[in-house]
Amino acid sequence: MHSFSVGKLRIVLIFMYLCIAVQMMKKNVEDLLKAHNVSPTAMRMIVLDHLLDQQAALSLADLEKALAPADRITIYRSLRTFESKGLVHGIDDGSGVTKYACCAADCGPEGHHDVHVHFVCRNCQETYCLPRSRIPEFTLPVGFQPEEVNLVVRGVCQVCAG
Amino acid sequence: MHSFSVGKLRIVLIFMYLCIAVQMMKKNVEDLLKAHNVSPTAMRMIVLDHLLDQQAALSLADLEKALAPADRITIYRSLRTFESKGLVHGIDDGSGVTKYACCAADCGPEGHHDVHVHFVCRNCQETYCLPRSRIPEFTLPVGFQPEEVNLVVRGVCQVCAG
DNA sequence: GCTGAGTTTGCAATTCCATTGCATGTTATG
DNA sequence: CATAACATGCAATGGAATTGCAAACTCAGC
């Protein structure tokens, strides 16, 4: 029959593939949440999924815009929950607004382990995590006991530098 | 005569010394302002002098309290002027409020040169500049061009640890 | 010393982000 | 399926940074 042409079959296959992909994505996000002892509610899955898609860190306002009409406060509280469970980390890049990005390593409620450099582009204003750039050793005056290090580099990013 | 005893002479000398010291201080602050192309108004001299006295960085609220009844906005604008002329630098220590400290090296309107580590004590909440602690080299991914580095260390300070 | 342009100051008001209270809706559990 | 615990959404609050504007001040030139 003409109705079962190769073209239509391709469309059906693509549709099925998309369904499976979405299911897998949802499964991944859901498992990720469960693995960190966070109830996988609809809202949280949407927020986390969107964060996982990003190259750069997002502010609360960014997320609100992207996920409209989701409630800002709910997103805010999701982020706080994620942060306390080691799923994402907030970044203070000096811009005055906190930005959020997913943790790369396996952080947990007891703390964040993937200490890395953050890079802020003065051109596009994006904030990137640079997990490959380890924070180097540095010396402190006698008596100062370091516990936590935050290294933010400003400059021009890969994309803007061309 | 008994009225010119050694004790009274000492008091007179101390008084004279204090007068000279205050004059020198005022002269120093005034010259410092002039050297950076900032009109040495009374308000600005008070703010800068107080900042020069500090071991730790001060927030706008700290300054307002210390210099009461000086106007907060005026202090704020003095700090902005100082910052743009390279006299002081603002520090974002992650606490959410900007703190200010005098520049050690000879910074100018074109930029701040004394790049150093900042240390925040989680006990006393003070923020210290550590000019002796140079920020070491670190590697960035290809294409990222660093221009400015901000290294904030949290921990326990000399005073609280000792 | 006086005047007037330019700068600085002080008050009031605004903006923006982060955070909380509370009532309602949803989920997990026995 | 009932109920406690948790999550959500709206409204409101709080605190810091910032701006507008009129009054006060500073300083150069007359």
Image: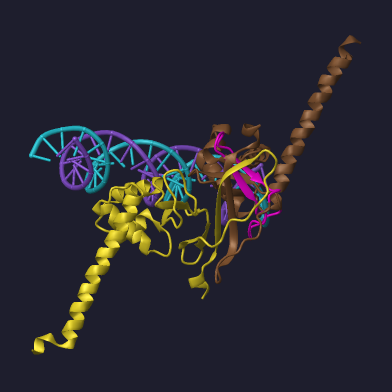
Chain colours: A yellow, B brown, C purple, D cyan
Q: Residue at x 9, y 90 (%)?
A: A2
* Residue B18: in magenta span: no
Residue B34 in percent (x, y) is at 70, 50
* Residue B123: in magenta span: yes
Q: Is residue A87 above or below residue A25?
A: above
Q: Nearer the viewer, residue A134 or D19?
A: A134
Q: Residue at x 41, y 56 (%)?
A: A102
Q: Main secondary structure of the magenta part?
A: loop
Q: For residue A42, which quarter of the picture?
A: bottom left
Residue B40 in percent (x, y) is at 66, 45
Image quadrant occupied by the N terminus of chain B: top right
Residue D24 in percent (x, y) is at 54, 40
Q: Residue furthest top?
A: B2
Residue B81 in percent (x, y) is at 59, 50
Q: Nearer the viewer, residue B20 or A136?
A: A136
Residue stretch rendered in magenta on the structure: B106-133
Q: Is residue A129 left or right of residue C19?
A: right
Q: Is residue D21 above or below residue A23?
A: above
Q: Nearer the viewer, residue D9 or B28?
A: D9
Q: Residue at x 65, y 60 (%)?
A: B137
